Each structure stands twice: as structure tokens, then as C-alpha cells.
Amino acid sequence: MLAKRIIAALDVQKGRVVKGIKFQNIVETGDPIAQAIAYEEHGIDEIVFLDISASRECRGISQALVTDIAKAIHIPFMVGGGLSTVEEIVSVIKAGADKVFVNSAAVKNPSLIEKAASVIGSANLCVAIDAKWEAGGYEVYVNGGSEATGLDALVWAKEAQRLGAGEILITSMDADGVKQGFDIPLNRSLSEAVDLPVIASGGAGKTEDFLEVFSLTAVSGALAASVFHYGEIEIRSLKNYLIENGVSIRHERNG
Amino acid sequence: MGNVAVIDLGVANVYNVVKALDGYVVSSPRQLREAEKIVIPGVGNFSAIAERLDDFREILVAKIQESTPILGICLGFQILFESSEEDIDLSKNRGLGVIKGRVKRFRKIRVPHMGWNQIELTGESPLFTGIKTGDYFYFVHSYYAELEEEGVVTAVTDYGQKGKGGFYRFASAVGTGSVYGVQFHPEKSGNIGKRLLDNFRRIEGRGQ
């Protein structure tokens, strides 16, 4: 049976891991490669590697860092942050990333999804959406959550699927960083709106939050950064807890 | 244990496969002549791979006749079959046709089938030494192989839930003669994947 994925995010700025609270007050905390290796050893299913500074400073993702990560780990990883052309996307895949995600650039120029998917394949292209509850719907925000678009998140997710996205990474801006659990209504409606795998992001604070999002929504994976990074949730304990509660989760056999 | 040639088919980065097998990258058919083992990796789509593989077709057929161990991974597994629904040109069978059957798209289920899933061993294969039913491998694919002869299937995987929308039990590994194929990505499947690649590296080709 296909396992639900536990995914760790590494927010990287200038080659170092950082984690923001509600996208601000960023504090530097560590070496991304050492962190990625540690996550693999602890049984994480996938790693998302986000160059959070790329979008605002308009500079590209470090291909050398992507290649170093590809050399260091043996589990899938995804890279994104400020990617805006097919050439940039292909270069990140060639550098060794298994998947890439696009966010702001795809909202501004939806044909980017179509063009990129035709080169790297839909399965390797994820569309990341930052959404915030506004007057009766979920509105898409771009540029690191700083700019409202007037676009409805569910409408946009369906359009991304039509254009060739292979996965949706949905971040609830309301839940992100406050550790009060995943945004269940958002994740439920979004995972029902599309036929693609959906990754829930934003809000993980305790192990029960993961059980909740897997029990109450159709998401394929749940992503967290700080709770793993600061060891507030131990990945193996989380996986054991989910298995005990009937969630399909990958566990590594000993010996 | 023999040198391992990994065919570079374009977009994908083959570093992980090359490293795990202590192999080398080849991008022209000529370089395959001396290969003692061959890996066909796969990311992209069937049409693009079929076109790129056209130049390699002749030498691959010759290598198969020589019983050179060959491992197809993901799309490199699908290309072993006769044809695929993903191919834009269905006027002729553009797969290698080493194994009878065709590749079809998953329907009425979340696509792609992406993530860690279990295998159930259904036949003997040197690829699976030390690997058991229930072990997890990493999959990313929207198409699956439908075989004409079940005898070559060495592992199957379930996707979906019986009685709840789409349900598939598909071939996740095959083996016939010296040709092996896996639908999952061993190079992305942590320790268990490393074991499978190591098993492939240890397979003895004829004349070695």
C-alpha cells in the first residue's frame, strides 16, 4: 500500500538552513547537507529544499548546492524558490534534484507549467501555492506571501493540474509557523479538488497534527520544518505513532 | 563484478545510479560495446526516450543476445515492453519489445503514483537477495506495464484500495534471462535500494 509521506523542509538562505515564523524573523541555524543526511538517517521520506531568498532577491538557486545534496542523500528531494524559466527548472533537474516546484512565476505566467512539464515530465513538476483565508475563500499569495493575487487557491490548483503539474504543495499562511495543526478545511478541499498528490504544509506542532491531517483529508504527504529541525518531533517516534494509529507509513526493516 | 555502463538519455541526472553501481556514463551506442552490465535509467516521457534509444536499439539487442545483464529503471523498465499509451507515435511499437506487453495509463486514481510503496515478491530473482515482501521502494510514475506473460513478473505492487475507486496490482519488477526491470527508483530508495543495486552489480554475466 502506498505510504503517506513525512516530508522535511529545509529553508535555505545564502547556503545555510533557516526557518521563518510566518515568513518573517528569519534566524540562521545550520548546514543543509548535514541536516539532509541526518533526516535520511532518521527515516524521513522526502526533503524539500527551498531557497527562500531567491524570489525576493531575483537570483538563481545554487546548482552546486543541489548537486552536493544529490550526492549526499539516497531519498527523493525537491527544490524550488524563485524559479521562473524553463531553463532554470531544467538546470536544477540536471544538477540532481528529483523534482522542482514553481510558485510565483507560475501564477504570473501559467504557461511556464505547460512548457516545463513537456521537458522534465509532469511527475517531476510540483506547483507550490501559498494561500490565506480571505472573505469566504482561500486567496493565492505570491512573492513569499507578501502579495495578494485575487486568485482562488482551488481554482488555481485545478488550472495547474490542467496545465501539467504533477503535484501540489499547499501552504496555509494562516497556519504556518503557529504550530496549532495543519489547516484541515484548506487541505481537505484542495486535496479533493485535484487528482494529483497534495502535500500539506504549515502548522505542524505535535504528532497528533499529522494524524489529524492524514485522517481528515486526502493529502499524500505532510511537510514540516521547525518541529523536525529543532527536534520537537522525533521522526521515528512520529512514524511509530502514525503506524499504531492505522496510517500507512514507511518503516525501515532492521537487518 | 564487471563494469557497469549507465545510458545517459538526456534530461535526468544519473549521478545516483552511477555512484551506487560504481559505473560510468555512456551517451553513444559505440561506448556500449565493451559494457559488461548496462543500466537504462528513466526520467522524462516514453516518446523522448524511444527516440533517444533508437540509436542504441541495435547494440542493446546484440548485448541481450550475449546475455549481458541489463537493468531498466522506471521509464527504462517501461521501454523494455513493446509499446506505451504515452507514446505520441503509435503507428509502430517503439519499445524494445524484450518483454511482451504494453504500458498503460493509471485511470480513476490519483496520478502520478508517487511515494514509497511496498513490493510483494512473486518469483525468484537475484535482484532481491536480502529483500523481502513488504519492503518499501520509492515510485514516481503515471503509467504501468500490462504483461502478456505473468511468468516474468518477480514483484507486484498494489496501488489504491479495493472497492474504493481505482485499484491496481501492477508489475513492479520483471526478469527474463539477463534482462531485469524495476518500476521503482532503487537509487532513491535509501538502504533497501542500495541493496538492490548492489545485488545487480554482483550478478554474473555469461563469460565473466
Image (cartoon, rainbow, N blue to C red):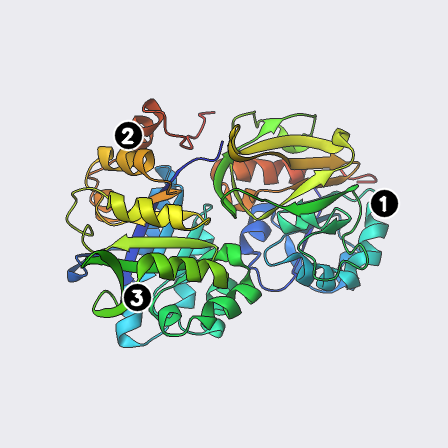
Q: Are marks 2 and 1 on the same chain?
A: no
Question: Residue A220 sits in which quadrant?
Answer: top left
In this view of the protein, can residue A14 be seen by the observer?
A: no
Q: CA distance from mark 2 to mark 1?
A: 50 Å
Q: Residue under mark 3: which chain is it in?
A: A
Q: CA distance from mark 3 to mark 2?
A: 39 Å
Residue farthest to the top, as pictured: A244
Q: Which mark is residue B66?
A: 1
- Do the residues bearing badges 3 and 2 touch, measured as CB atoms within 8 Å? no
Q: Which residue is mark 2?
A: A237
Residue A223 in picture, x, y percent from top left? 31, 46
Q: Nearer the viewer, residue A23 or A29?
A: A23
Q: Is residue B40 above or below residue B12?
A: above
Amino acid type, mark 2: Ser
Identify the residue shown where x is 30% and y is 66%. Answer: A151
Q: Which mark is residue A151?
A: 3
Amino acid type, mark 3: Leu
Q: Nearer the viewer, residue A156 or B177?
A: A156
Identify the residue shown where x is 59% and y is 52%. Answer: B18
Residue A105 in picture, x, y percent from top left? 37, 71
- Label 2: how many residues lie within 10 Å, few (<14), some (14-19) or many (20+)? few
In this view of the protein, can residue B23 be seen by the observer?
A: yes
Q: CA distance from mark 3 to mark 1?
A: 59 Å
Amino acid type, mark 1: Glu
Q: Are marks 3 and 1 on the same chain?
A: no
- Label 1: how many residues lie within 10 Å, few (<14), some (14-19) or many (20+)? some
